[in-house]
Image (cartoon, rainbow, N blue to C red):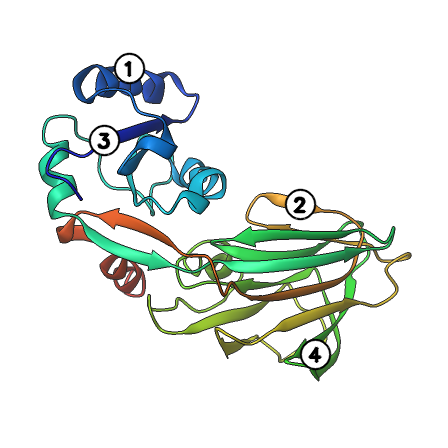
Amino acid sequence: MPKTPRIAFLASPTPDAQGVLAAMQSRHGRHAPEDADVLCALGGDGFMLQTLHRHGDLGRPVYGMKLGTVGFLMNQYGEDDLLARLDAAEPAVLRPLEMRAHTESGATVVSLAYNEVSLLRQTRQAAHIAIELSGQTRLDELICDGVMVATPAGSTAYNYSAGGPILPLGSGVVALTPIAPFRPRRWRGALLKADTETKFRVLDPYKRPVSATADSHEVRDVVEVAIRESRDRTVTLLFDPEHNLEERILSEQFVA
């Protein structure tokens, strides 16, 4: 990265973030994402994910500053030493999941997920879902509120709340975690190699409809969902050395 990089500042719509956006652009200039050397996302984790979905295909590193409620993927906010922080920042390369969802209407929807892909029941009735791994049926019927596949970066979020494991960054595995499982009563999920193709088949989708969500992109009335690690997409997040993403994930495992 150049010593004086061209920075594209992107901000959530909150008043605080918009105020910082104006101040940062006044100090460091205004550049479009496609013309910048680095993107600087101002907001919370939701806005960071939005930034990755909108601009991840540009291949630019992204440095986030927390100006939202949750900031696990963000650095602490500070205006005065941004160029020095960018110069010293450590990269974390993330590879998202690719979701291919087929709906009962015959549509096919493809979407990426940097945190997780989750399936959830749409009505009061429990979902009935079969699980295949790399073409082999591993669970004939999971009766549950839902089920998800989570990346290491996303393992501390919804996955952990549902009782799934926290995964070290760079571990090469993903978490397969049920959401409020009823049967099999003792099944609590699995750890899978990241290149495993996980396929969910919705049993009785008309009586027990299910939706699939890749981060925040929801697809209703799915009948089959295939998930695998993307083979051709990565994004690079930048973190201050004293509190990088690997250290944050490790620290989460020792929170009482």
Residue 236 circle label = none
Q: Earlier in the sequence, mark 3 or mark 4?
A: 3
Q: Check if mark 4's residue and mark 1's residue have beta carbons within 8 Å.
A: no
**Nearer to us: label 4 or label 1:** 1
* Residue at figure coordinates x 43%, y 38% from the top left: 51
Q: Check if mark 2's residue and mark 4's residue have beta carbons within 8 Å.
A: no
Quarter of the C terminus within the rendering: bottom left
**Nearer to us: label 2 or label 1:** 1
* Distance in Å between CA atoms under marks 3 and 1: 16 Å
* Residue 254, percent from left and from top: 27, 65
Amino acid type at mark 2: Glu
Residue marked by disc 1: 22
* Distance in Å between CA atoms under marks 2 and 4: 27 Å
* Distance in Å between CA atoms under marks 3 and 4: 54 Å
* Residue at figure coordinates x 62%, y 57% from the top left: 118
**Nearer to us: label 3 or label 2:** 3
Residue marked by disc 4: 184
Amino acid type at mark 3: Arg
Q: Earlier in the sequence, mark 4 or mark 1?
A: 1
Residue marked by disc 3: 6
Quarter of the N terminus within the rendering: top left
Q: Is residue 68 visible?
A: no
**Label 4 secondary element:** loop
* Residue 208, percent from left and from top: 85, 58
- Vertical position of residue 146 compared to residue 74: above or below: below
Residue 218 circle label = 2
- Vertical position of residue 218 compared to residue 223: above or below: above
* Residue at figure coordinates x 51%, y 77% from the top left: 192
